[in-house]
Amino acid sequence: MYDRCPNDESRETFLLPPFVQKMVDNKWFGDKTNQGFYKKVKNEAGKSEILSLDLASFEYKPKSKSKFPTLDQTKTIDSFKDRVKILFAGKDKAGEFYRDSFCSLFKYISFRIPEIADDLYQIDDAICAGFGWEIGPFKIWDILGVQEVVKMMEAKNQKPAQWVYDFLAKGNKEFYQYKGGQLCYYATDGSVKVKPGSENFILLDACREKIVWKNSGCTLLDIGDGVLNLEFHTKMNTIGGEIIQE
């Protein structure tokens, strides 16, 4: 990618770090050579032990567990939207890792429009379909707050493409919005369009303001035309007492 993308604004990030080349030179290719970032050995007791590569000394050492308060806070939170907000706001190394990663990601995807995609939803759909993401990066950006994240990106020297600033200058706050029960997205020509393929679907997120009743396990939504929808949000969609509660 470094050789073939000479005009990419993020070209320098395509260079592999020196330690990767050193591993290649040492022929530490992973499982095929029985060592890579990790190495399985027999300890003094004759039991298998996995050592990890210290990138500073380039020696294998016993693995040490890391503990980050930010990650601990998310263990009991099922909602992705709630989890990602906590991860992004973390004050420890884990939080800094997420901020660095997402700010870099948001910058990169902003510059890919219109280079590889005409509209932002196409990038989200590709990421979800190709990598199994639950929510695409532009939707994640929405969750975290577009304007707030841009300020953080600027502080990290990760300024997004100009069209994002044009988007904010027009008073926009989210890349996606629901109108008339349909999912719409911001187009770079400044208009708001219905996402293609979603016209014939009833989107529950568009009906959140019409909650008839809810408890910890389910929500009863008015989806129009005299129709109610019972939505489960228990783990694995199991049917417990809260689902059948009158």
Image: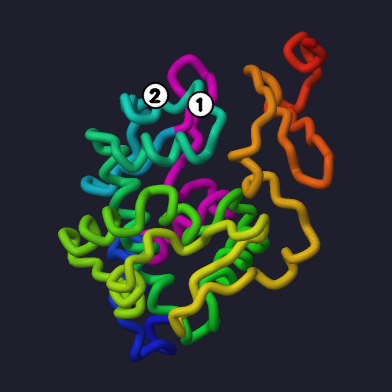
Count residues near mark 2 (Cα–Cα under 10 Å), then give few for <14, some for 14-19, many for 20+: few
Name the residue tied to disc 1: 77
Report whether 213 appears left or right of 5.
right
**In magenta segment, residue 1:** no
The residue at the point 37 percent across, 65 percent down is 172
- Residue 110, above or below 144: below
- Assign the N terminus to one quadrant of the image: bottom left
Name the residue tied to disc 2: 73
Numbered disc 1: secondary structure: loop
The residue at the point 27 percent across, 61 percent down is 150
Q: Do the residues labelled 2 and 1 touch (CB within 8 Å)?
A: yes
Q: What residue type is labelled 2?
A: Gln
Q: Give the range drawn in magenta.
A: 23-50
Of residues 21 and 234, the one nearer the viewer is 234
The residue at the point 39 percent across, 39 percent down is 85
Q: Where is residue 20 in the image (x, y as percent from the top left)?
A: 36, 62
Q: Report the residue that reaches farthest toward the front.
A: 226
Numbered disc 2: secondary structure: helix
Q: Where is residue 40 in the image (x, y as percent from the top left)?
A: 50, 36
Report whether 58 appears left or right of 129.
left
The residue at the point 43 percent across, 48 percent down is 143
Q: Report the residue that reaches farthest toward the left.
A: 155
